[in-house]
Amino acid sequence: MEEGKKKNIVEGGDKEILYSKAIKAGKRIYYLDVKKNLKEDLFLAITESKKVQAKDSSAVTFEKHKIFLYREDFDKFVDGLMDVIGYVKSHKGEASRPEEAAPKSEDTAAEPDSDIKLDIHFDAE
């Protein structure tokens, strides 16, 4: 799915997706879907989809986890998310992932650690 592409799965009802973004990250894909419930309220459905292959067979399944985030909680959620991301970034040397420890190639310029900045606006329609 293209970034930021509008998509309607079901017209009306509480399954309608008004806006969607997929974030591919290794074996996981995160879906950020703006949906509308039956009361016409918008909310954010965050889905993590992870490919899982059973050790004893070649069957592949997808494990999914969902979080529903409501408009009245957006600011508190973003504040908390920024806080924990800041903590992880400041402590990243304590338990880094292998790809973070790998030396960078000459083609890849080293980026200095910087503060994360999010500019999120939720406009009422």
Image: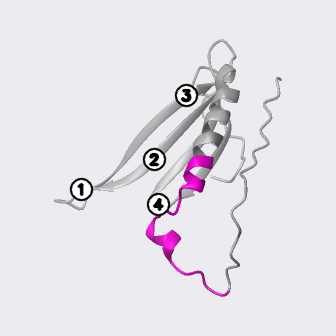
Badge 3 density bin: few <14, some 14–19, many ≥20, Cα 10 Å: some
Between 81 and 41, which is closer to the camera in this rendering?
Answer: 81
Residue 33, percent from left and from top: 62, 37
Between 85 and 28, which is closer to the camera in this rendering?
Answer: 85
Question: Is residue 103 on the magenta stretch?
Answer: yes
Q: Which residue occupies 63% across, 31% down? A: 77
Q: CA distance from mark 1 to mark 4?
A: 31 Å
Q: Which residues are magenta?
A: 86-106
- Give the labeled residue for mark 3: 68
Q: CA distance from mark 1 to mark 2?
A: 16 Å
- On screen, 81 above or below 104? above
Image marks 1 and 2: residues in contact by CB distance under 8 Å = no
Q: Which mark is residue 49?
A: 2
Residue 123 relative to residue 55: left or right: right
Q: CA distance from mark 3 to mark 4?
A: 32 Å
Question: Is residue 125 on the magenta stretch?
Answer: no
Residue 118, percent from left and from top: 75, 45
**Dot 1: element:** loop
Q: Amino acid at mark 4?
A: Glu
- Give the labeled residue for mark 1: 54
Q: Which residue occupies 50% across, 77% down? A: 102
Q: CA distance from mark 4 to mark 2?
A: 28 Å
Residue 17, percent from left and from top: 64, 33
- On screen, 55 above or below 105? above
Quadrant assignment for the C terminus: top right
- Give the labeled residue for mark 4: 94
Q: CA distance from mark 3 to mark 1?
A: 29 Å
- On screen, 101 above or below 78? below
Badge 1 density bin: few <14, some 14–19, many ≥20, Cα 10 Å: few
Q: Earlier in the sequence, mark 4 or mark 2?
A: 2
Q: Residue lying furthest top in this view?
A: 39
